[in-house]
Amino acid sequence: METNSGRFLKAFRSIEQHLRKVAGGGRDSGIIEIMSEATRRDPSIARHEDDLHKFRKLRNILIHGDIDGTEIAWPSDLAVERIERVKSLLMSPPRVVSVFRSKVLTGKGDGPVGPTIRSMMEESYSQLPVYDGKHFLGLLTMETVARFMGKHLDETVRDLRLTPLREVLECAECEDAHVFIPARTRLTEVLAKFEESDKQGKRIQALLITREGDPNEKLTGIITVWDIPGIHERL
């Protein structure tokens, strides 16, 4: 049965090889240099930076910290589980296709807003992609609906519930942001997109998933800000 030390060192070697590949560094480059360059090339690695430095220190103790060939330290079960988890996240990062692939409620541009809002409320959806055939028209949000209602609040001639969705979408503003992403996108990249939009003061309402990230491809999933805590748990 493989010892904890054996498992730990095996996982560390795999991580080191992966980081060297990402960094494009040779065998003579030091591990700290490799970690720095790999993080520069792939910012998602920074999420594991603290762990990687701890792993490096423990690796050094395991290799050099013995007395007359007898180990004076060994990794705990928790340390082994953690390094193997980090190895898995680095080498086989979870992608949106494996987590968020699902049937998505959509609306038709000529469809009436009233029944659409009712369906959104019944399903507890705050965003709904709207299409004209296969052509993406926009993302209907409750904020957009509120602006539309406010704009036409004094109208008494027509029933606003029958207004086509394409007309309601004219009230969408920049804060109703949406971005299309490929199904192969990593979850770490998803978090980065949300974080970057927050820094710019333009929060993304939803990430819309298609095979290649083309707006006019079949929609295979959707990610909203409400999914962020679940993504963090997976990472």
Image: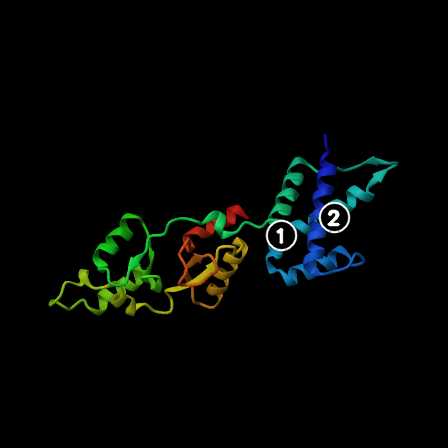
At x 80%, y 37%, the residue is: 72
At x 72%, y 51%, the residue is: 16
**Residue position marked by numbered label 1 in the rendering:** 48
**Residue position marked by numbered label 2 in the rendering:** 57
Name the side, left or right, on which 229 lies relative to 110.
Answer: right
The number of discs equals 2
Which three-letter amino acid code belongs to the residue tagged 2? Lys
The percent position of residue 145, horizontal first and vertical second, equals 27, 62
Provide the secondary structure element on which disc 2 rests: helix
- Residue furthest to the right in view is 68
Local crowd at mark 1 within 10 Å, few (<14), some, or many (≥20)?
some
Which three-letter amino acid code belongs to the residue tagged 1? His
Rendering quarter of residue 66: top right
Name the side, left or right, on which 65 lies relative to 51.
Answer: right
Spatial separation of the CA atoms under disc 1 and disc 2: 14 Å
Q: Nearer the viewer, residue 72 or 216?
A: 216
Q: Nearer the viewer, residue 214 or 17?
A: 214
Name the side, left or right, on which 72 lies relative to 152.
Answer: right
Q: Earlier in the sequence, mark 1 or mark 2?
A: 1
